[in-house]
Image (cartoon, rainbow, N blue to C red):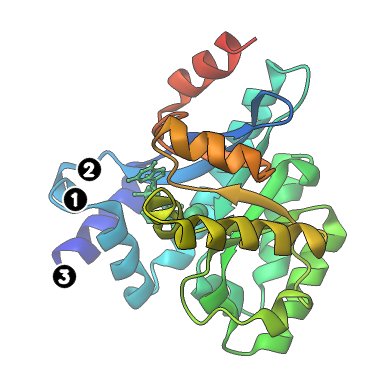
């Protein structure tokens, strides 16, 4: 209840903010994407981490309003970021399962794109495997509609949950995000690194690009680069940072 009230207060008084974590493109040798991550400025919620807050919001349904705010704010942010850029960046936005299940999910996204005037090609939506499982066919149809608009789709937390290879080919995604748990184990044994190598090769063989998340060490980076992993995300590149810091980070890399 304390969290629920805190979230309500944040929504009413605009006390949420977005942080940004860069994704480093190995081939281009620069940051080409950022992931938008929710943070709160509210002291009422300072005891809780964002994961607890989001879990609560999924139960209370407040996640729908949060998603709405996050997507709009992410669109505005990438507009501003790309004003400084010769080559425009992409922004990834996490989408909740509850939102996907709403009848007006696609219309909602369309409306925000129109209102903010953002280039749909700059927006990557991160979707988890588990969020699609209920009403799978209906959800796939929605994803195809988003794809049609020019949005890219990333399959988040890949390898966790009930990963099933039989649907991977049916999803209109362009990136797979290898979960941090695989990246963590990668240096421990040859079995673990073979696993990551194989996920990357499999993805490439069916025409998908790969993001590795939770990369914290140079050794992990080098190994992933040797497997031709396209995008690297993690503390080794940068922690999630606020707007001013991400702007400086991007401008300093040239
Ligand atoms: O931000 P952090 O790095 O601590 O993320 C914790 C969890 O919260 C992750 O599972 C992440 O996907 C989720 N998360 C962070 N920001 C958002 C957001 O804006 N929307 C949704 N739905 N989930 C988010
Ligand atoms: O579930 P999702 O992948 O959207 O969540 C991203 C989460 O991972 C965020 O909480 C972000 O802060 C966290 N994260 C990103 N990079 C690293 C990292 O290198 N190490 C750790 N421990 N967490 C990370
Ligand atoms: Mn994510
Ligand atoms: Na992720």
Whether residue 47 is situated above or below residue 34 in the rendered picture: below
Report which quarter residue 14 is drawn in: top left
Residue pictured at 61% horizontal, 55% vertical? 197
| Residue 210 % position (x, y) | 66, 51
Residue of label 3: 1
Residue marked by disc 2: 42
Can see residue 191? Answer: yes
As drawn, the label of residue 45 is 1
Q: Residue at x 77, y 57 (%)?
A: 204
| Marks 3,2: beta carbons within 8 A | no
Query: Do the residues under discs 1 and 2 have CB atoms within 8 angstroms?
Result: yes
Question: Is residue 242 left or right of 98 when viewed as pictured?
Answer: left
Can you see residue 139?
no
CA separation, marks 3 and 2? Answer: 15 Å
Q: Secondary structure at mark 3?
A: loop
Of 201 and 157, the residue lying toward us? 201
Assess disc 3: are there few (<14), some (14-19) or many (≥20) residues with their C-alpha within 10 Å of its C-alpha: few
Q: Mark 3 or 2 closer to N-term?
A: 3
């Amino acid at each position: 209840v304390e969290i629920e009230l805190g979230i309500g207060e944040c929504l009413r008084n605009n006390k949420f903010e977005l942080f940004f974590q860069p994704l480093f493109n190995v081939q281009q040798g620069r940051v080409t994407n950022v992931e938008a991550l929710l943070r709160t400025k509210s002291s009422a919620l300072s005891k809780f981490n964002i994961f607890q807050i989001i879990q609560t919001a999924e139960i209370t349904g407040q996640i729908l309003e949060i998603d709405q705010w996050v997507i709009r704010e992410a669109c505005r942010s990438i507009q501003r970021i790309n004003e400084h850029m010769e080559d425009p960046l992409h922004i990834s936005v996490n989408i909740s399962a509850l939102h996907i299940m709403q009848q007006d999910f696609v219309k909602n996204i369309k409306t925000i794109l129109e209102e903010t005037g953002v280039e749909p090609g700059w927006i990557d939506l991160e979707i988890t495997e588990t969020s699609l499982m209920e009403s799978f066919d209906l959800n796939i149809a929605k994803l195809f509609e988003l794809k049609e608009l020019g949005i890219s789709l990333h399959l988040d937390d890949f390898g966790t949950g009930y990963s099933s290879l039989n649907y991977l080919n049916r999803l209109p995604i362009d990136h797979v995000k290898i979960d941090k748990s695989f990246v963590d184990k990668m240096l421990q044994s040859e079995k673990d690194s073979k696993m990551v190598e194989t996920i990357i090769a499999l993805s490439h063989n069916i025409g998908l690009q790969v993001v590795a998340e939770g990369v914290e060490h140079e050794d992990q980076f080098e190994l992933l680069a040797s497997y031709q992993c396209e995008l690297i995300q993690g503390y080794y590149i940068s922690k999630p940072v606020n707007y001013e810091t991400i702007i400086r980070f991007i401008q300093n890399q040239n």
